[in-house]
Amino acid sequence: MKYLIIGAGGTGGPLGFYLTKAGKDVTLIARGAHLKALSEQGLTMERLWNGTRETILVKAVDMEHYDEQPDVILVCVKGYSLDDTVPFIRKVMKKNTIVIPILNIYGTGGKLQKLLPEILVTDGCIYVAAAIKEPGVLEQYGKVLSLVFGVRDQSETRPELEEIRADLESCGIRTLLSHHIQRAALEKFSYVSPIGAAGLYYNATAADFMKEGAPRESFKEMIREIGALAEAMGHPFHKDMVTRNLEVLSTLAPEATSSMQRDVMAGKPSEIDGLVYEVVRLGKEYDVPVPEYEKVAAKLSRELK
């Protein structure tokens, strides 16, 4: 299968690295200095948990110079850039291209499907802690690297989805083809949203969440609020997400922060609307109290105006 990954940062970069390393046909879409470094020097992965550093050659171009028709498109951009990918996907897709959005924000697959009704758009989510350290270099903060994807309507299931799962699994990427992707996406959201929200509120690193204290308690309470929302939305969790998310957190390097934190601190556009304010809106829509999110949202909306 021919893979195209739109975005070569903390989500798309690791996927492109391990797919390429395993010999798969994959192209990364990047831009600017990062693209220049990828093209000239390859992609370097620094693993903070064991101090290793590895560089491999990758195929990387910008949107303007990609001239193939991929079988699979992995969309790995920030939520605020999602709409910008649609004209490009339209240009390069064929009738049986499968699009797998892998974003932090819940509901992006359904949104993208409405914009691309001619092809199949699944939902997807990923567990990984990585970021661009400098052009051409990624830091991976923890060992966790797993991907979950699937169709929202089981009547849309295709044999190719299992082939994609097997491809990813063979690259060392733990991959689940889920028959309950909305629940799986909300489970992921119950990690990435609280860790980003509490991280910003308390200016906290992973080390602060690993010990007892206000950041850890806030993180846990927001997970519970997402769980209540999931129940109201008809996708109840079947596992203790507080315990599971604390286990995920325990694998991170102590200095790790969320991508939303890093973007806000750098003065860049961020996913705060979809990761924090959207939860408050959903709480009102489904009549679910989310007081911890309301507290965090109120402070952040004042400070980040």
Image (cartoon, rainbow, N blue to C red):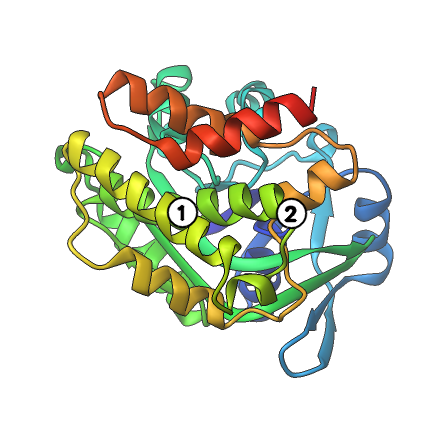
Residue 121: x %, y % from top left: 35, 31
Q: Which residue does the numbered mark 2 point to in the structure image? A: 28
10 Å neighbourhood of mark 1: few (<14), some, or many (≥20)? many
Residue 209: x %, y % from top left: 52, 62
What residue is shown at x 84% (from left), y 38% (from top)?
A: 32
For marks 1 and 2, the one nearer the N-term is 2
Element type at mark 2: strand
What residue is shown at x 62% (from left), y 78% (from top)?
A: 49
Q: Nearer the viewer, residue 266 or 54?
A: 266
- Which image quarter is the C terminus in? top right
For badge 2, the amino acid type reads: Leu
For badge 1, the amino acid type reads: Cys
- Asked whether, in this view, residue 179 is left or right of residue 16, the answer is left
Q: Is residue 67 visible?
A: yes
Whether 200 is drawn above or below 111: the answer is below
Whether 251 is drawn above or below 24: the answer is below
- Asked whether, in this view, residue 226 is left or right of residue 34, the answer is left
Q: Which quadrant of the structure image shows residue 228?
A: top left
Element type at mark 1: strand
Whether 195 is drawn above or below 173: the answer is above
The numbered disc on residue 125 is 1
Mark 1 or 2, closer to the camera: 1
The Cα atoms of the two marked residues, 1 and 2, are separated by 18 Å
Q: Residues at badges 1 and 2 in contact (C-beta under 8 Å)? A: no
What residue is shown at x 28% (from left), y 28% (from top)?
A: 289
